[in-house]
Image (spheres, rainbow, N blue to C red):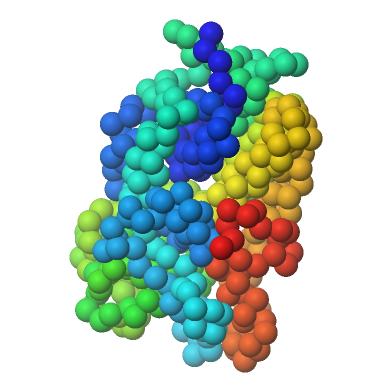
Amino acid sequence: MKTFDITVIGAGPIGSLCAILLAQLGLKVAIIDRAPKKVLENPTRDGRGIALTYGSKTVLEKLNIWQKIPISEAEDIKEIRVSDGDSPLFLHFDGAEAGDHPLGFIVESHLVRKFIFKHLVKQKNITVFDNTTIANFDVLPAHVEIDLGQEKLKSALLVAADGRYSFAREKMGIEYIDHDYKQMAMVCSVTHDKPHFGVAHERFLTPGPLAFLPMTGNKSSIVWTESPANAADIMQLSNESFSALMQKRFGSHLGSITLDGGRWSYPLKMVHARTYTKQRFALVGDSAHAVHPIAGQGLNLGLRGVCTLVEEIEKAQKIGLDIGSLTPLEAYESRQKTAAISMIVATHGLNALFANDTLPVKVVRDLGLAAVNEMPGLKNWFMKQAMGISTKFSGTLPKMMTK
């Protein structure tokens, strides 16, 4: 039986970053994933652009990962423009009003995964068990035993980063709330005639939001939300018809739009675990909380949780506490639940508000956008939320996310 301090399930961005941060504390870490190493090292393009907050970029900078991503692949979000269908009223956020750095950064998902995993395999005290499925695990009073079939592992703590349909969460008997939004997100990238100038557009339509997120050059990452029935029909269209319909939904702000590469679709669901921790066990990322992508905060929220967990483990380590005991784990859960519930309420509420197209609601909604646009203090608070540096309603930020 191989012994580790901590075992992490899932080598996606959240699980990998968790392992890296734990290894920096001098802990011996095992990380397990079903995918073979060659897939983890070179993930295929999946159409998704990740919107990283300033706080998340700070973490990647401190780990020397951000510096490895080619500058030609990362675009600053300088401004955000929020509009409601064809209404002339809008809400505009200018990053220059909030500080001397952008509101966020757009990088394609497969690149973020690639460079994080590349950094992971360089860590001497991390052992990767790739192409591996967990047969079973048992949480015992003094440690956790993980059965991999051919071999067994033992560690003081098991961290599950295995996604919204978490096997580990189910094995631990942790109940969760889920909500099917009855929406599909179609994702792709496009080229357009006119430059975006670093402006992210979020246009709210009755079926769901249509977001154009700036990428390098005259390119944008698209998150287009529709009903499942509509999405199924739209995904069957030719590339030309798909682009033409997107153009009709979005308008001519960026000139002619052309699909760049493939397109993918994903069902949208909210998931929230009733508890994130048990003795010697912790949920992180989508295993604990999966939110609507309306604000592009899923990965950022997950990374905040990982940084919080590692911070609490470090505190326990310094005073000689068992790192798998409930003391550091409950401290992590208390802090992260505050942030997660705030984000769930905000994204759930926004989606419901803009999905209601009755005239009274639409009038109030549009007037609300216009009113906020004229309130510098409130706009500044919204911008800090988007940048991942606000602590109001979401609790204290982990130190790794601050300069």
Q: Position of residue 33 (x, y in %)?
A: 44, 28
Against 402, residue 133 (above or below) is above
* Residue drawn at x 42%, y 72% as measured from the top left: 77
Whether residue 360 is visible here, answered yes or no, is no
**Does residue 312 appear in the picture of this structure?**
yes
Who is closer to the viewer here, 300 or 233?
300
145 with respect to 76 (left or right): right
Please tell me in which quadrant of the rendered image residue 300 appears: bottom right
Decide which of 403, 106 is in the foreground and name it: 403
Position of 177 with respect to 77 (left or right) is right
Residue under the point 37% across and 29% down? 35
Instruction: Please tell me which residue lies in front, 186 or 118.
Output: 118
Q: Quadrant of residue 211?
A: bottom left
| 316 to the left or right of 354 | right
| Whether residue 191 is situated above or below residue 306 in the rendered picture | below
Residue 275's spot in the image, x, y percent?
A: 73, 38
From the top left corner, tell me how far across and down residue 139 is, in percent.
68, 18
Q: Residue at x 49, y 83 (%)?
A: 96
